[in-house]
Image (cartoon, rainbow, N blue to C red):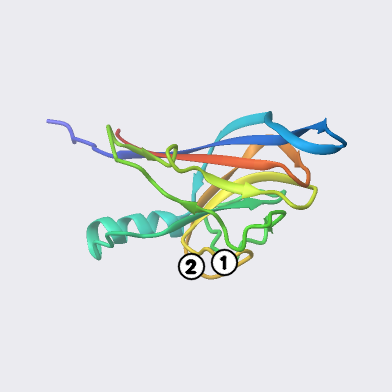
Amino acid sequence: MGNLIAGVLSSTRYKVECFRPRFIEFKGRKELAEMVKIWEEEFKNIVVTAGLNKLLDATFKTGLTSPAWYVGFKGSGTMIAADTMASHSGWAELVPYSDSTRPAFTPGSISSGAVDNSASKAVFNINTSSTIYGCFLADNSTKSGTTGTLYGGGDFGASRSVVNGDVLNITVTLTQASA
């Protein structure tokens, strides 16, 4: 009889939508007419070793019941498995937004081995023109913070420009499937 190999496949997808305000002239003043979707992109995540260790610890060792996670932007460069919040020399965090902290990842119900924050997307209010390259998930809300656990992150297919006034809505979907 052969060996039975069982496993779990983990994946994370980010869906980023960029909206820009469109104004109209009304009685001599500008008024917001609508928010227009400028671009949308989905991409996969690398889960770093620290993120995998956090999952194992919370699930099988300590039973951490309500961790808090936050979404951030990354600059150019490649995320690797050895990256942590304290040490990620291949890339830097970008903070071209007015929010005082990284937006929270607020997951909904777990169903069929997946959970996402589609009912409460992470929202970034852009206040500085910038080029962003991807996103990451960490358990520390401090902008540019270097403590806490980096779960992982990923890159867009190509860099994306944002300008003052843009609003980015980010949906993160985490999936576990039997291998």
Q: Residue 73 has which mark?
A: none
Residue 67 sits above or below residue 166 on the image: below
Q: How many marks?
A: 2
Q: Secondary structure at mark 1?
A: loop
Between 165 and 86, the one nearer to me in the picture: 165
x and y percentages locating residue 26 in the rendered image: 81, 32
Asked if residue 23 lies left or right of residue 17, the reply is: right
Residue position for label 1: 142
**Which quadrant holds the C terminus?**
top left
**Residue at (57, 52) in percent of width and height:** 80
Query: Of all residues shown, which one is farthest toward the front?
Result: 27
**Residue at (51, 51) in percent of width and height:** 152
The nearer-to-camera label among 1 and 2 is: 1
Residue 124 sits above or below residue 83 on the image: above
Hey, which quadrant is residue 57 in on the image?
bottom left
x and y percentages locating residue 132 in the rendered image: 71, 45
Label 2 sits on what residue type? Gly
Label 1 sits on what residue type? Thr
Mark 1 neighbour density, 10 Å: few (under 14) some (14–19) many (20 or more): some
Residue 26 sits above or below residue 122 on the image: above
**Residue at (45, 43) in percent of width and height:** 120
Between 16 and 174, the one nearer to me in the picture: 16
Name which of mark 1 and mark 2 comes first in the sequence: 1
Asked if residue 75 lies left or right of residue 81, the reply is: right
Residue position for label 2: 148
Between 61 and 37, the one nearer to me in the picture: 37
Hey, which quadrant is residue 7 in on the image?
top left
Question: Do the CB atoms of the residues marked 1 and 2 lie less than 8 Å apart?
Answer: yes
